[in-house]
Amino acid sequence: MNGLGRGLATLAGLLLVWQAVVMLGDLPPYILPDPWAVARSLWHHGGSLLHHAGVTALEIVLGMVLGTLLGCGSALVLGYSRRARRWLLPALVASQAIPVFAIAPLLVLWLGYGMSSKIAMAMLVIYFPVTANFYDGLRHTRRGWLDLARVMLPEQRRWAVLRHIAIPAALPALASGLRVAAAVAPIGAVLGEWVGSSAGLGYLMLHANSRMQVDLMFAALFVLAALAVGLYFLVDAGSKRWLPWHRPSPETETD
Amino acid sequence: MTPSQPALPASATPLPARLAVSLRAARLVYGGMTLFDGLNLELGGGGFTCLLGPSGIGKSSLLRLLAGLTPPGVSGELRGGDGRPLAGRVAYMAQQDLLLPWLNVLHNVTLGGRLRGEAVDRSRALGLLGRVGLADAVLARPDTLSGGMRQRVALARTLMEDRPVVLMDEPFSGLDALTRLRLQALAAELLAGRTVLLVTHDPLEALRLGEHILIMNGRPATLSALPDLPGTPPREPGEPAVQAAYRAILRRLEAA
């Protein structure tokens, strides 16, 4: 695996730089612990890290699933109905002016300290990239395909064209939306945990931070990063597996 | 079809009744320029007509008008020979093969039926794929095929529609010379009996395939018919009659 090798080399390089910064800057462990301290903490708090990572992972995955369903549904409605487009699209764009971070306390107030407020956060964070990308894909169906469908089926049957041509054609766009979603969903979940929670990596980080356990904080951060990267590669591999016909190549045909 | 060929299922399907096409007073204004105005076009039922003209003259727009893909700024009265509208009785083949990359060859060929929610006649599709020489590539994905093979799939898809009128917009212009010659022969054979209008900018292609040849020229463009050539298509490019007609076409295109 060439990609894996490159990834490991990059990781090793970053660890070296980290170690060098700690040594050369003569930084105390409560400001920046060295990689070994973090590795020790990772080992020492393994059970607790695993438990909290599980909570966060569940929040992320459920948020991804629900946000994807909601986003795909919205994009389909927008793609199907011109009236929906006229009324909902401005509202959708305007809703993006509200930072999700600002409504995190509200969500905790409404949905409680448990998982549901974090799932809602992750959902909200990924809703827009999923909707926008999928809708964009639905709108940019290759003109020649639509012409062909029009000749084959002269009476306007939008659903048939959507189902057989526009939706499959938009799947690569949806896949890139999902890749963005995989990258930002962990932000949503952890943010929700920061605002108020009793479990999860975000909770663990706040807890460790207040006790000056900076090495544990870094360990939690490391687990979170691993989680996010793993999720991204899962989505990426999935999209390659399910859309084998979509290969971005330099000789992409122009219409 | 030559009698020496084995009777495949596809050849057993009866051809749809021959349908003439009539377009009256067609007019297209595009970007403030009148491409054609008061244009009349009559296609006899079951004939193979080639429409020849320089690029940008409005050939493709005329073809799209016939296909019911009316671009903005176009008008005209379009009827089948029986006086009824043409919509639903036309098959269309473009310069790009327009294969859907996520469907295999067989599913691409049967796309029309699935779009209309009809039961798909699988054995007929397989027969057609056999006729275009793709019996071994039925389950292949389009991106694994060569340009010539892809265009053969598009031809099979066009035939699968089984419409009395077939409109083709430079379907072979993206292919290399040898593949083009082969596909032209195949198209001439498989489209026999249908009312075909093939748009091309290649005089030799028109001479090889056309029972009738129309030249579109001038601005606003007008149509003029070339005297019908002897012999049945596909004609050999080297035939003396073809050579003579080729020179005549060039003179006429240059004169405009």
Image: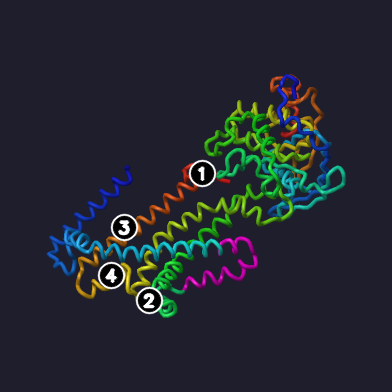
Q: Chain of mark 3?
A: A
State how far apart marks 2 and 1 are (Cα): 44 Å
Residue that mark 1 sits on: A245
Closer to the camera in the image, A147 or A72: A72
Residue that mark 2 sits on: A113
Q: State the predominant SS element of the stretch in magenta.
A: helix
State how far apart marks 2 and 3 are (Cα): 25 Å
**Crowd band around label 3 with a 10 angstrom C-alpha radius: few (<14), some (14–19), many (20+):** few
Residue that mark 4 sits on: A204
Name the amino acid type tagged 2: Tyr
What's drawn in magenta, residue-wise? A74-97
* Residue B193 position in % (x across, y down): 79, 32
* Viewer-nearest of discs 3 and 1: 3
Q: Quadrant of residue A89?
A: bottom right
**Crowd band around label 4 with a 10 angstrom C-alpha radius: few (<14), some (14–19), many (20+):** many
The disc label shown at residue A226, or none: 3
At horizontal 38% and vertical 74% (from top left) the residue drawn is A114
At horizontal 63% and vertical 48% (from top left) the residue drawn is A145
Name the amino acid type tagged 3: Ala
Q: Quadrant of residue B4?
A: top right
Q: Residue furthest right?
A: B82
Name the amino acid type tagged 4: Leu
